[in-house]
Image (tube, coloured by chain):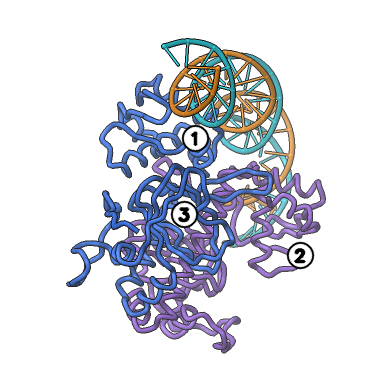
Chain colours: A purple, B blue, C orange, D cyan
Amino acid sequence: MHPQTVAALPIRPVPPSPDSHDIAVGEAPLVSAFRLHGAAVRFSRNTEVYGESERAEYFYQVVSGAVRTYKVMQDGRRQIGAFYLPGDVFGLEGGVEHAFSAEAVVDSCIRIARRSTIMALAVTDPELATDLWSQTAGGLRLAHEHMLLLGRKSAEERVASFLLDMARREASVEMVELPMSRQDIADYLGLTIETVSRTLTHLEDKEAIELPSSRRIRLRSRASLQQLNG
Amino acid sequence: MHPQTVAALPIRPVPPSPDSHDIAVGEAPLVSAFRLHGAAVRFSRNTEVYGESERAEYFYQVVSGAVRTYKVMQDGRRQIGAFYLPGDVFGLEGGVEHAFSAEAVVDSCIRIARRSTIMALAVTDPELATDLWSQTAGGLRLAHEHMLLLGRKSAEERVASFLLDMARREASVEMVELPMSRQDIADYLGLTIETVSRTLTHLEDKEAIELPSSRRIRLRSRASLQQLNG
DNA sequence: CGGGATATTGATTGATTTCAATGTGAGTGG
DNA sequence: CCACTCACATTGAAATCAATCAATATCCCG
């Protein structure tokens, strides 16, 4: 379950990334801290970023690619808690150990900062400390939203919510590019791949979406989806 | 405001605390802050402590009774995110507004501290800032655990997990006292009251539990329940 | 062009919900 | 003290939604 550890990975210098505009104005303290103290590391598709109950020694920020955090039961049932896209920060654990595992969904570049470094900065920088805390609280808000989805929504509502959320996060007008597989989506929505697939087909039949390929989805009628969003 | 002491300390790892004069040894900084700066307020059964999208001006700690936090959809479907028992801290929002609502499950006494007061203290007290943050992160851990339950567990597994969790939190050997109704349990577990009721009956048939009354449950065989816990 | 992984579609089953009664228990007033 | 009531809980029967089992289909990638 732990093919590689963070410590064992080769840490390379930050490569020139397309999103590295020098915008420091209004930048969140934590983002600045990552820019100044983070090292970029590449993770290939499906490799572990960190494992559950591994010591939480780093904080992470997605530069490119996508990451999933999840928990698994003994018998293999998996629940994905969240997907992280470029710009998103994850792994902000309060405890000594990670509460769940994280894996790269596709080949990804992830900025890594030592927890001790950030924490040391936070002691003298209340702005950073507050930001750190509100990032974590933001995650809690999303978690509650996700619980509402898992506990109370129908398959169709779950898929619609997911698509709208992905579209919003990708800041895409119509076309949504999914970095994750149907299995990932199913494990995120608490469904089976068959149900996810059928539901997408059904939404296509209703002309709410269009499926040019399995990883590309065009939102034809946001209104229809919004109606299912709850 | 009468000086009341928390009967049971919250069950959570206490970080290495420094030598502090006015702070009890081993007590978490946030708990101390509540003791020093919190005012006790009574809420009767089913009354709102705060509402979703209300300004988050206070932090809360249960002294006695029980609290539920939840989200509701337009059509009334409700998902309870967590129950808070004596000693537990809640309402630690990072944003300006609350992300969900909180209500007293039964007549409760709740200690309330001004967010601004705690935040001001946190600026000069890194220990407190860290504690504040790790409390929030602890909530995130619980939220992920709850997601696994909602997304991937069967009705029987959900009920078993719930009972074991309640027993652990009440530090009870065999008898669990439930402050909440079947509807609350159902909305917490993502089930209907009928399914909760049926599942409890089924567990009683299997001699895993005993139901002397609807709010009192005797755990006869933790092993059986543990097996369902996942 | 072939082959393995991934995705879709179909048929059927089954767990949970829904609809509908019935039961229970605490509090109230006669 | 007993009926009465109201809220809450249990039980039963039927319906439904999603899971499971099973077969194709499609997409990459060498």
The answer to whether residue A205 shows anywhere in this view is yes
Where is residue D17 drawn, in percent x and y?
Answer: 67, 36
Tag of residue B122: none
Q: Residues within 10 Å of mark 3 (few under 14, many from 20)?
A: many
- Count all numbered tags in the image, as a single digit: 3
**Which residue is disc 3 drawn over?**
A70
x, y percent for residue B93 = 48, 64
Q: Chain of mark 1?
A: B
Residue drawn at x 49%, y 70% as measured from the top left: A89
Amino acid type at mark 3: Tyr
Residue A164 percent location from the top left of the image: 68, 59
What residue is shown at x 56% (from left), y 67% (from top)?
Answer: A85
Tell me the quarter of the picture where residue A124 sits.
Answer: bottom left
Could you say whether the residue bearing mark 1 is in a helix, strand or loop? loop
- Foreground pick, A156 / B40: B40
- For mark 3, give the secondary structure: strand
* Residue closer to the observer: B123 or B163: B123
Task: Answer few, some or many: residues within 10 Å of disc 2's Cα (few below 14, many 20 plus, some between 14 and 19).
Answer: some
Residue at 64% x, 48% y is B73
Residue at left offset 46%, top offset 31%: B156
Tag nearer the camera, 3 or 1: 1
Mark 3 and mark 1: Cα distance apart in space: 18 Å
Q: Which residue is mark 2?
A: A174
Q: Chain of mark 3?
A: A
Q: Is residue B181 left or right of residue C20?
A: left
